[in-house]
Image (tube, helix red, strand yellow):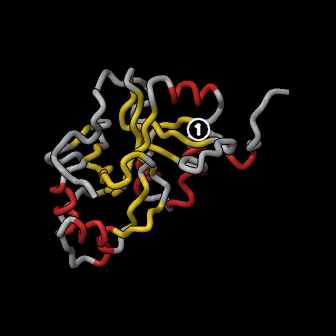
Amino acid sequence: MVWGTGAPYNGAMHETSTLSNQLLIAMPGLRDPNFARGVALVCQHGEDGAMGIMINRLSDYRLGDVLAQMNLRSDLPDVVDSPVLVGGPVQPERGFVLHTPHGGWDSSFRISDLISVTTSRDILAAIAAGNGPQNAIVALGYSGWSPGQIEHEMRENAWLTAPVDSTILFHTPLDERWRASAALVGVNLEQISPYAGNA
């Protein structure tokens, strides 16, 4: 697993569009196994494409496993047993922490006034000691889209967008986040046909 002091995302950062700091919610017809029934927080979106972290995919790891690989340890059962998520299929060995509040970590990118993503080891050490951010999601890997890809996929009805809700991000059970995210914009995903096409 890779944790360091480099930029959280190695793509260029340009002026963000309206999809940054949005939830990207897979529509029922999206069959890609990496994203089916998935929800991603879009961290960056611009002319070079987009980067996001999935927030409802459980990995096979617990935070104690990640800490051990970083030669860190925690005596706090809630920390050791915390779930680690699959952030996406890109660089699955690389770690990311979505969190509030911002804090003075070595390598953070501010997604919004409330949420940051950090990739440096110091945040893990703080979490292990019980001094980490009030709210945090630890994820391995990220989701990436090439320039224009999200826009194209949205025109194909693959995705729905919703404003970020910190309750969903940090407190809603994983298996409820897909439906709860869509409900933010009044959509009941159970009532949508999983088959897209033209009559």
Residue under label 1: 185
Q: Quadrant of residue 186?
A: top right
Q: Quadrant of residue 7?
A: top left
Q: Residue at x 45, y 52 (%)?
A: 55
Horizontally, residue 111 falls left or right of residue 123, namely: right
The residue under label 1 is which amino acid type? Val
- Does the image show residue 104? no
Q: Position of residue 182 (x, y in %)?
A: 59, 43
Nearer to us in this view, 111 or 47: 47
Q: Quadrant of the C terminus?
A: top right
Along the line of sight, which residue is nearer the eye, 149 or 20?
149
186 shown above or below 153: below
Q: Is residue 81 visible?
A: yes
Q: Residue at x 29, y 38 (%)?
A: 9
Left or right position of 69 against 91: left
Nearer-the-camera pick, 15 or 188: 15
Q: How many marks?
A: 1
Foreground pick, 61 / 175? 61
Q: Residue at x 18, y 50 (%)?
A: 4
Provide residue 172's location: percent of width, then percent of height: 48, 58
Image location of residue 129, percent across then percent down: 17, 69
- The residue sitting at 32% across, 50% down in the picture is 98
Q: Position of residue 157 (x, y in %)?
A: 65, 32
- How many residues crowd mark 1 within 10 Å: few (<14), some (14–19), many (20+)? few
Say left or right for 112 vs 60. left
Up the image or down, 44 lies above or below 192; here it is above
Q: Secondary structure at mark 1?
A: loop
Q: Quadrant of the N terminus?
A: bottom left
Indicate left or right for 158 with 106 as reference.
right
